[in-house]
Image: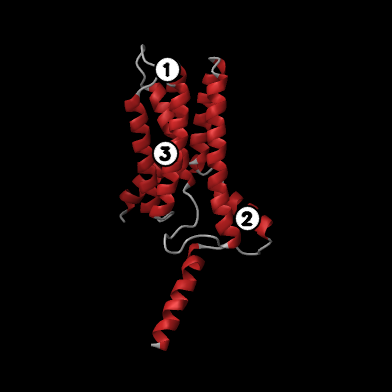
């Protein structure tokens, strides 16, 4: 991969970073709160919390105990993909809504496409496997569709949604995009819960298969 290609994928992957997507979520949440759409906000927050818990649990299970799937090359759901796919479609759906419309389906679709691009960037950068990215995208899809279902009859406030988009410019800032060291936190939590001194890594997932294959070849 050339330098320019890597640089491109790094910017794309930052669109799913917690330090960018969570502030974006908070601005939209503030809009919903001020607009009196508290039930809509609650539904989205519950869905987001459940999705975040599932992602975190999948990562802690592997990092702390090595629970994963060698055949699927699965060590935990892609958090970047999940966050991008669960927040960007909601934001873009409200941002691109026409004055007489509550939500823009084209905006939702564009947000889902960007979430998919974030997933591809995780593959290009070697951060995740296809199964982990797909799990993150479909989980994010479920969350964003939940938000769409409860918000589609509400009028968006484009000014606030447009302001929220300023956070996406931070994708070009490596320091800000890595402001939340989420992976370090996941490792610390996993080790504290499991009591192990070292985290499991992807190589550990495939080591039993390689050792079994080597043993079988030797016996043959």
Q: State the residue in front, 114 or 2.
A: 114
Can the viewer see residue 87?
Answer: no
Residue that mark 3 sits on? 172
How far is mark 1 from mark 2, CA to CA? 41 Å
Residue lying furthest bottom in this view?
219
Q: State the residue in front, 217 or 195.
A: 217
Residue in the picture at 34% in, 37% down: 113
Can the viewer see residue 190?
Answer: yes
Element assignment for label 2? helix
Quadrant where the image shows the C terminus: bottom left
What is the x, y in percent for residue 13? 41, 44
What is the x, y in percent for residue 29? 54, 25
Q: Which mark is residue 190?
A: 2
Residue that mark 1 sits on? 158
Residue in the picture at 39% in, 43% down: 118
What is the x, y in percent for residue 151? 46, 22
């Amino acid at each position: 991969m050339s330098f320019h290609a890597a640089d491109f994928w790094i910017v794309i992957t930052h669109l799913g970073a917690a330090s960018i997507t969570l502030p974006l979520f908070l601005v939209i949440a503030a809009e919903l709160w001020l607009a009196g759409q508290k039930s809509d906000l609650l539904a989205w927050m519950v869905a987001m919390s459940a999705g975040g818990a599932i992602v975190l649990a999948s990562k802690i299970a592997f990092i702390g105990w090595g629970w994963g799937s060698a055949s699927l090359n699965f060590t935990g759901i892609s958090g970047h993909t999940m966050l991008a796919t669960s927040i960007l479609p909601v934001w873009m759906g409200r941002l691109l809504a026409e004055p007489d419309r509550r939500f823009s389906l084209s905006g939702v679709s564009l947000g889902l496409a960007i979430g998919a691009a974030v997933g591809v960037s995780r593959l290009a950068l070697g951060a995740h496997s296809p199964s982990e990215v797909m799990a993150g995208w479909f989980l994010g899809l479920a969350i964003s569709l939940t938000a769409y279902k409860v918000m589609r009859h509400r009028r968006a406030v484009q000014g606030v949604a447009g302001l929220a988009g300023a956070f996406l410019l931070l994708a070009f800032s490596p320091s800000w995009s890595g402001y939340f060291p989420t992976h370090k936190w996941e490792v610390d939590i996993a080790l504290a819960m499991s009591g192990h001194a070292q985290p499991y890594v992807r190589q550990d997932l495939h080591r039993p298969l390689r050792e079994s294959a080597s043993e079988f070849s030797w016996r043959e």
